[in-house]
Image (cartoon, rainbow, N blue to C red):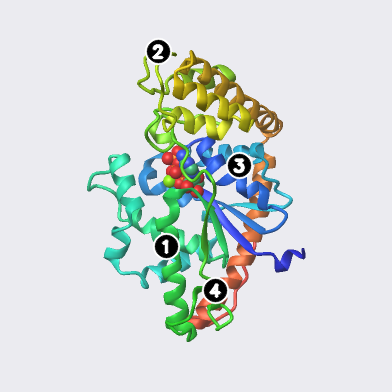
Amino acid sequence: MAAKNRPVVLTGDTPTGQLHLGHYFGSVKRRVEMQDSHECYFLLANMHAFTTRADKSEEIRNDCFDIVLDHLAMGIDPDRSSIFLQTEVPAISELTYLFAMLLPFNRVLRNPTLKDEIKVKGLGDNYSFGFPLYAVGQTADILAFRAHSVPVGEDQVPHLELTREVARRFNQMYCGVSDQAEDHEHVELGGVFPVPLADVGKIGRLVGTDGVNKMSKSLNNAILITDTPKQVRKKMGKLYTGRQSPTDPGDTDNALFHYVDVFIEDPDRIAELRDRYSRGDNIGDGEIKVEIAESISKLLEPMQERRRAYEGDRDRILAILKEGSEKAIASTEATLNAAKEAANLHFFDRTIRYS
Ligand code: ATP
Ligand code: MG
């Protein structure tokens, strides 16, 4: 398919540390699969990392390099996809400001993902003004590329809903699109922005090794892409089911079987484990955990090998980010231009380029 006619995909990660299996199954795995059929942009949300860690700018910068290494490890190919820095793309900030005018303040604050984050990260009522603003910023991340779909985990769906609202409102307010128009008709009716779809995969929420919460770096329940087989076994060992003995009939709706379903490849083996576990047929949680851990390490091994090939080569990573950012700038400047024309904000043409 000619690159120009491919549907556009935009998604990304906040540099809050190394990536983990939740990121892989929630989003990155599908990114890898889309590289030939879609025009792919993968963003490092380094400005959004400042919303809660403005005092840790050096860590955030280092996390950016780590994330690129993890991307490459998981199979993202910089020759086919653009990996770029949010802060290198001015159109995103400019659209954030404009979109902030299109959303009621209280609508942004009602976003359940923001509320969850405030609770989970213990932000209380002292979070920065920029913290809720990041939800608006995320609408700009996506719409700046006029993305058609956004491969994300389940927690991102409220953000996508906000993005869809911004796209509709902009197209109705400035492009004469009727408020009766269907979402898929917006562009053909003259709207600048497609109304994008959240593309949540089969595993929209990978549970962490605490067996309860979403796998998350900040909750210390994550298996990292770089974890050694020993670390994986240790983390899996912590998964608590409450089952006492290998002869107790177990509940296969528990977190252990969430892992079995995700990580054991052979469907016959999954069926066998389910059957024996539910009957208490002399099968311990421990042996299942070891089997899962082995399967995880088998998945991680080639990733870690690829990662090692790039480690320590910051110049190479910088070159990837520069090329990705240049492509992102080209795409988003065109969008910004169209948006400014529609909103009567266009006065002069401009070109942005690196020296
Ligand atoms: P962390 O809490 O570990 O920093 P995060 O959710 O804040 O992770 P983001 O950078 O916000 O990380 O998310 C990047 C992508 O990965 C998003 O699409 C998100 O939905 C997805 N994701 C992250 N954790 C999981 C998970 N445990 N299961 C499924 N998808 C996930
Ligand atoms: Mg997050």
Element class at badge 2: loop
Looking at the rendered structure, the kind of residue marked 2 is Ser
Q: Position of residue 167 (x, y in %)?
A: 47, 71
Q: Residue shown at 63%/70% (left/top)?
A: 351
Using the image, determine if residue 280 lies above or below residue 206.
above
Looking at the rendered structure, the kind of residue marked 1 is Glu
Per the rendering, the mark at residue 68 is 3
Residue at which label 2 appears? 245
Element class at badge 3: helix
Distance Cα–Cα, label 2 vs label 3: 43 Å
Q: Out of 75 and 249, give the one closest to the viewer.
A: 249
Q: Earlier in the sequence, mark 4 or mark 1?
A: 1
Q: Out of 54 and 328, give the one closest to the viewer.
A: 328
Are circles 2 and 1 on residues that touch, CB within 8 Å?
no
Q: Earlier in the sequence, mark 2 or mark 1?
A: 1
Residue 225 appears anywhere in the view: no
* Beta carbon of the mark 2 residue lies under 8 A of ligand 1: no
Per the rendering, the mark at residue 161 is 1
- Residue 84 placement, left or right of 214: right
Q: Residue shown at 36%/72% (left/top)?
A: 101
Looking at the rendered structure, the kind of residue marked 3 is Val
Q: Earlier in the sequence, mark 2 or mark 3?
A: 3
Residue at which label 4 appears? 184
Q: Out of 118 and 298, give the one closest to the viewer.
A: 298
Distance Cα–Cα, label 2 vs label 1: 45 Å
Which label sits in the foreground, 4 or 1? Answer: 4
Q: Earlier in the sequence, mark 4 or mark 2?
A: 4
Q: Earlier in the sequence, mark 3 or mark 4?
A: 3
